[in-house]
Structure formats: structure tokens, C-alpha cells
Image: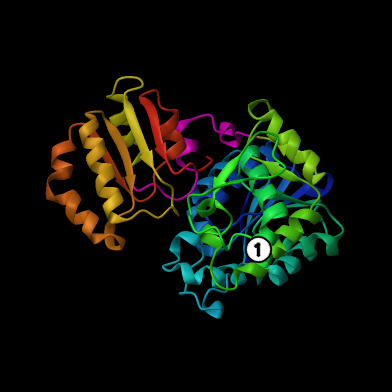
Amino acid sequence: MTLSRSGDGQSGSARAHFVLVPMMAQGHTIPMTDMARLLAEHGAQVSFITTPVNAARLEGFAADVKAAGLAVQLVELHFPSVEFGLPDGCENLDMIQSKNLFLNFMKACAALHEPLMAYLREQQHSPPSCIISDMAHWWTGDIARELGIPRLTFSGFCGFSSLVRYNIKRQTLYIIFHNNVLEHVTDDNELITIPGFPTPLELTKAKLPGGTLCVPGMEQIREKMFEEELRCDGEITNSFKELETLYIESYEQITRKKVWTIGPMCLCHRNSNRTAARGNKASMDEAQCLQWLDSRKPGSVIFVSFGSLACTTPQQLVELGLGLEASKKPFVWVIKAGAKLPEVEEWLADGFEERVRDRGLIIRGWAPQVMILWHQAVGGFVTHCGWC
């Protein structure tokens, strides 16, 4: 276990000490870096738990909080990838090559229990006051109880999504998996009413629980996550109450938990340099990206990005590209192609990039999404419905 990149700040002996444990996936980790900054700006000390590969991705964030003199420390724990059947250095969900390795990854995450506990027990000069962990890290509940401190969950969802997810899990998940009431529902597009919701809500069978977590062996982990969600001391959401008062209040009533709405947390960044430093190192120079956006009229650019984990087929990407071309509008398209999707790379090179080069900016890999979205040239966002 190595410790590194601590912010200067004042002595931590008289301040609250928050331990942040993000899920090792970009859409989960990035908002927790914003949370770390917000907590530190309000005088708290923050230990941000990560792993070597993920810490390397957070170099911009670490340098930024250090320059600001904030008491944020990245704590690097060894991630047992090889021990759990993952490739060496596979420490983030976007590095998993097969859905079948998801369970291995979750088990490797849970194995961080002992090294994290050892680190926290060493903090005698500044014992932890509270653990804020991703809902997927159910095992942090045991740590919080053993230390006698609160554990708050962070899901990354908005209040509406959290309420939908909770109601489905609480009222239908057990029935779906144990009583098989849906075994006679043969049409995946048949609408099913979601009970206990403040407004009418129907979902198709295809959109009921399962999805990316529906892999062999995940049932027990899903149950542990839900059990720990019931036992936690509250939840933090990256939203604000004025946006979705009904759903947040309903969520508090049904869970009997306090919900802290502290979003949008990305607003803690006040310039393009800081927004560009969020997450992984950008695949394109930010100055080049800004120069391209500056050359466009306000509200004229379509921004297309489906996040780091969403899966799209080559055929879908080609259709999307043809749609952008047919729109005759300027666009920024963040695309995952390269070695993973060679047929898409071939299609891009076979005339598409040349045809759209005067109005299309294609970014392969990671992009400074918030920086782009804040630019006045951007007028529309085509996305997988992630939550910045």
C-alpha cells in the first residue's frame, strides 16, 4: 500500500475526515472527485481511495487539489486483478474485455476490505469521521460499523432514477427472481406497472432489473448491495432538490433515509483547465478542441458521446455517423473504435472522415465532456443518458 499526492492544507486533527470509496468506473469516479473537492473546500480532510492504474488517470485532479492547498489525499491500494482471474493491471470496468469477467471484478473490489481497514486503523492522528462509498461497494458497510462511523452511499443517479431502482428492487426484484411471476410474460416489450411510485410509471420486461449485472453469480452480490443500502445512514446524490422535489422526497419517505442533494457537483469547476482535468487524460489536446469549438456559431454544434461503458455495435455506430452526416450540422463525436472495432475504423477511413472534415470533430477515446458541454457553441447532446 502506498500513499501519495496529499494536499497541503491545515492540520487534520480538528477537522472532519471523509473517506471516499468510488467504484472504479469513470462515470462513478469522476463525480466523487468533485465531491472530494467540495468537501475539502468546506474545510474537511478527504482520503480518496483508489488503485495505481486509476490514480494515474487522476493525475490532473491530484495536481489541481494540491495546487489549491486542499486536504485531499489519494490513497493507492493494490488491486488484486490477477488473483481474481483478471488481466494484470485491469483495475477499471472500462478495461474488462468480457461481460463474464464482471463478477471477478466485483470480487476483486471486495478484497480491498482488509487493506482499506488497515489504512484507516493507521490514521490515529486523524481518524475517519464518515465513509462515503459507491453503492456497489457493499463491503464498506462492515468497515464503517467496525469503526463506529456513518456510511453514506453514493449511486451517481438522479433522484428519479434512484427511486425507480429502489422500488423495483424492493417490490419486484424478489418476486421476479424467486416466484417467477413473469414466466408467462413472453413479450419483452409488454408493459408492467411499477408499484409504489408517486406518478404513473410503466416499464417493459426488457427494462426490468438485470442488464449489465445479469451474469452468473451476481445474484448474491446484488442482494448484499441492497441489504447494505437498507442499513446505510443516508445517501448522497448528484442532483438538486429543486429539479426533482417529488421524487427525492418520495425516496426519503420510502427508504427512511436522509438524502443529501449536493449536485450538480461539476459546478465546482470554474475554468476550462479544471473541467478538462476531470477523469482520464483526454485523447485530444484541449486547446485544439476549444479552438475548433470557438470557430462555430453559438448553439450550432451537436455533441455525441455514449460514455466509457455503454456498448454499441459497429452497425449502430455506422448508422449514427450517417445520421450526423445527413444532418448537415457541425458535430463533435466521441467514439470508441480502434482495435476493439476495426470495422468501424475501416468505415471511418473509407471516405467518412474526409466528407465531414469541414464540420465534424471526431475524438477517439476520452474527451473532456463537461468542458465541451459548457461551450456556447454546443446546442445539443446525444448521449446514453449518463449523469455528469
- In which quadrant is the N terminus drawn? bottom right
Label 1: state its secondary structure: helix
> Residue 168 location in percent, x, y?
66, 51
> Can see residue 33?
yes
> Residue 21 location in percent, x, y?
66, 56
Task: Tally the numbered discs.
Answer: 1
384, above or below 375, in the image: below
> Residue 102 location in percent, x, y?
52, 67
Q: Report which quarter residue 9 is drawn in.
A: top right
* 360 to the left or right of 199: left
249, above or below 56, in the image: above
- Of residue 199 and residue 187, the one placed in the foreground of this image is 187
Q: Report which quarter residue 111 is drawn in.
A: bottom right
> What kind of colouring is applied to the model shown?
rainbow
366, above or below 115, in the image: above
Q: Residue at x 57, y 74 (%)?
A: 80
> Can see residue 133?
no
| In the image, residue 357 lies in the stretch drawn in magenta | no
| Type of amino acid under label 1 | Arg
User: Residue beneath label 1, please?
Assistant: 222
Q: Residue at x 38, y 25 (%)?
A: 379
> Residue 327 location in percent, x, y?
24, 30
- The magenta stretch spans which residues? 263-284
- Mark 1 nearby-residue class (10 Å; few <14, some 14–19, many ≥20): some
| In the image, residue 273 lies in the stretch drawn in magenta | yes
Q: Residue furthest front?
A: 184
